[in-house]
Image: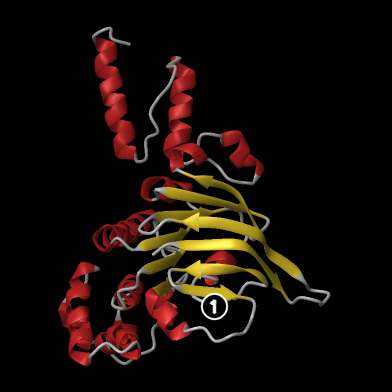
Amino acid sequence: MQLSFNHVTHTYMPSTPFEQHALQDVTLSIPSGSFCAIIGPTGSGKSTLVQHVNGLLRPSSGHVQVGPFTLTAQKRKTALNELRRTVGYLFQYPEHQLFEETVEKEMIFGPLNFGVPKAEAIERAQQLLPAVGLSEELLSVSPFQLSGGQMRRVAIASILAQQPEVLILDEPAAGLDPLGRRSMLQLLYEHHQKRKQTTLLITHHMEDALQYADHIIVMNKGTIWKSGRPEDVFAEPEELMKVGLQLPETIRFMQTFMQSTGVASVPMLKTRAEVIAYLTSYLQRAEKGGV
């Protein structure tokens, strides 16, 4: 499902001493089926931007188009229930969203609320739990008896059970260790690949944006500072530093490698495994006098 913002401005507490322009004349388009990472310094407007996609916020001016749904400043009736069935929103620390007595009731709550028959909702729960790395035996267990990692996976599965066409991930791996973060994001990325839904990922980790996104939006002071493919966005490190961002770890390492070896250019490598493979190949060629 394609998303578009057309000259969208959002102002918190307008006409008061606390007035704040969180978005300023934002115009952008996100293609259907893309995995889009939204990055930028704290307070740049990332969360405000995505909260317009499922109607949590309305534009102060301009309009937002989410497939067939149009959101404007006017308070005319919008089918928000259908919009929110279409747009799944995973907040930071999604385990705080849990409230039901059992894992099964938690997972079927959303689908039932959106009109899915109970038998189908239960079937979705049974299929999704193993997909997020949990046993079906947990369906009858209280989610509050689970570990923190398990609770987060249940919360994620409860959103995925709604089968949204658009999935918003607002720092979904916040608070996890590096291994847990990679595992969580890989799970969500594989789901994206399987479902081909439009996915928006808000993240402070440049490595995640580089590894998973096919499109990146850089925000700064409520505006779209830069938008494009990862290789284009990360091609200008000095510009990124101006807005308080750094290059991903792998790109920084390869830049140092270029400076120390005199290599004219290197590919944009997304993971440590790719860096290791490149360096192994380089050393093998160096031994044969090929560099």
Q: Is residue 291 left or right of residue 75?
A: left
Number of numbered discs = 1
Relative to 144, is 44 above or below? above
Q: Is residue 261 left or right of residue 140?
A: right
Three-letter code, disc 1: Leu
**What is the quadrant of the N terminus in the image?**
bottom left
Observer-nearest of 271 and 143 = 271
Quick one: 29 or 135, which is closer to the camera?
A: 29
Q: Image quadrant for the C terminus?
A: top left
Q: Nearer the viewer, residue 285 or 144?
A: 285
Residue visible at 38% across and 62% down? 198
Residue 131: percent from the left, percent from the top? 21, 68
Q: Which residue is mark 1?
A: 56
Q: Nearer the viewer, residue 43 or 286?
A: 43
- In this view of the protein, can residue 128 be seen by the observer? yes
**Alpha-carbon neighbours of circle 1 within 10 Å: few (<14), some, or many (≥20)?**
few
| Residue sitting at x 23%, y 90% | 117
Q: Where 128 falls versus 36 (above or below)?
A: below
Q: Residue at x 55, y 56 (%)?
A: 28
Q: State how the image is colored.
A: secondary structure
Can you tell which quarter of the image residue 121 is in?
bottom left
The residue furthest right is 17
Q: Is residue 197 above or below residue 105?
A: above
What residue do we see at 40% from left, 77% from top? 95
Residue 236: image location, x then y, percent: 56, 34
Which secondary structure, mark 1? loop
Where does the image place residue 129, in percent across and percent down from the top left? 22, 74
Q: Residue extending furthest top?
A: 289
Residue 65 horizontal/vertical position (percent): 51, 68
